Amino acid sequence: MASRRPSGPFDQLAEYFADHPRALLSLQIVPPLVFVFFFVFVPLASIFAWSFWTVENNRLVPGFSTSAYEEFLGIGGLPTWRLDIFLKTLRIAVTQTAIALVLGFAIAYFVGIKMRGSKYALPLLLLFAVPFLTSYLLRTLSWYIVLQSRGLINTVLQSIGATNGPLPGLLFSEFSVHVGLLSTYLPFMIFPIWLAMSRIDQTVLAASADLGGRPRDTLFRVVVPLALPGILIGSIFVFVGVLGDSVVPEILGGATDSSRTLIANLIDKAISGQQYPMAAAIASIILLMAIGLIWGWERAFGLKKIGEI
Amino acid sequence: MSSSGSAISVRQGQLEVFFAKHGNLIWKLFVGFFVLYILMPPLLLVAVSFEPSGIVRVNTGFSLRWYDKMINSRGLMDALFKSILLAFLTTAVTTLLALQAALGYRKARFKTLIIAIMILPIFLPGIIQGFSLSLLLTEFLGLQRSLWTELVGHVLWALPFAFLVILTSMSVVKRETVLAAMDLGANEWRAFRDIEYPIIKPGITSAAIFSYVLSFNEFSRTYYLQGIGQTIPTYVWNKITVAITPEIFALSSLTVILSLTLIAIATIYLTTVGRVAKARKEKAIPRPAVKSRHKAPAPAAATAAAEKA
């Protein structure tokens, strides 16, 4: 120990931490974890409590009232329009998850299995990561240009003489909502599935072929079962994402018409109307669904797999 | 019965022959379509921003009038300035926290739990996170919505991405390399500064760039956390919920170009992580920069480090 000659403030600190490795570890890992815990987990846990509170003079007051849930569910002769919108959102979320699953699985299969070992696999995958980083708002807005009456699709169709006027139902429809949602949530499906597939050993695939398995057999009996954790977690991400999406229905669904509103728009409306318990109740229901799905996934595959996904 | 069965199998056979012949082309067209699906609409925003007429449509000509209008719009330039300031603050805080988390992660137990906590915010619907955080900060901590509350939301959004990027770049660093440095007398700080940091520097740089882009484009959380003054995304949102007008597209197109450029730079940086480490190994240049290198090895420190690992 005496041979060490610290030469700067950082070296002196390092000397100290060499004898106290746990102190250094705490200094490194604790601030980010505390930050995330305090600003993510505490508010999320509070949401459940707030949903039972009441509002007096535009402020939340502690209490226990289930009126937000009763209003949401339409219990006791209250109107059920919120519940109707929730059920419609569930239907759209399931449809969207199915669409994203089929397309995302195919793309992940191409990148993860067919392009295995190619130097173009990673750059291709990175192209699909671009939506994570670019503006979700602008991406949705750009679909408005593609789909609107003087937009790309209608202009092209009319200039080649395929149609005389704008196609109906291209914008402000469930179709346009699905188109917009897909461009946001497809990468959420591709990446977990690709990650699960990239862990499938090449020799396993070769063995399946050697034993006389046709490509189709290898796909359904080897690749799909091994990629199942990725497939399910990707589906959960897409499903929960759609439940929490308010921008796509507003821009592409025409949310000014209440029949096209999705559940997240109701949270937004409740907040601007300062109905905080209602906003918290809807958010709680979405969160509970997310927690339930992830809990089921954990029961099936174990938390260890999260490290792999 | 049997004849219809064989007819189906013949048709299936034909289908398989067709796929065997053109399978690769079909795959490439399929994946290529979805690359375009994800990348083309934002580029269309750029095209539309040069449309000379006053309506939102596919271009009929080229004009810079909407850029002129943008520069002369006070509110818009204020929003741009605020977005840039916020993005710089987010970058600084996020990169530091992400680096700390990544350094601590290697030594910590409960690795899967840490990963799960750190990356959870990616998959939380922004509206729920923004709403719950805003209520916690304003109603319960008594804070005013301001630049600082926005900063918290932005850091939460960017942190998981930055953490994953730095963690990925650290996977290149071999534990033995660091141990060797410590065997030669470097303390933990020196081992980090002289050995590890040069290798992971591209990873840190791209994590910083990703944080910047993510903050610049963040919408849902900012919407609920912002104080006086809008950022680019919330400015765009407030305009388009009233009416979608062309001047928005000048701003949008600048944002898209900036984001895509930065993403490209960050990606290129990130791919140099492995290469730097490789080049180091191949050249094996002695590094004279380590000033306080001791001749005598410090076996105590090395064994302590080995036990930790």
Image: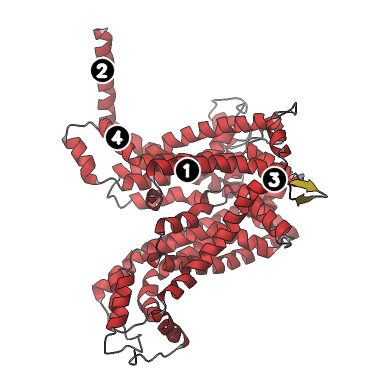
Q: Chain of mark 4?
A: A
Question: Do tag 1 and tag 4 residues touch (Cβ < 8 Å)?
Answer: no
**Residue B9: which disc?**
2
Q: Chain of mark 3?
A: B
Residue A234, relative to residue B6: is it above or below?
A: below
Disc on the earlier residue, 3 or 2: 2
Reading the image, the residue beneath label 3 is: B240
Marks 3/2: CA–CA distance:
55 Å
Q: Which of the 4 quarters of the picture holds residue A86?
A: top right
Q: Quadrant of the N terminus of chain A?
A: bottom left
**Residue B126: where, in percent of width, then height?**
60, 49
Q: Nearer the viewer, mark 4 or mark 2?
A: 4
Q: Nearer the viewer, residue B119 or B17?
A: B119
Marks 2/1: CA–CA distance:
43 Å
Q: Which of the 4 quarters of the picture holds residue B281?
A: bottom left
Q: Are marks 2 and 1 on the same chain?
A: no
Marks 1/3: CA–CA distance:
39 Å
| SS assignment at label 2 | helix
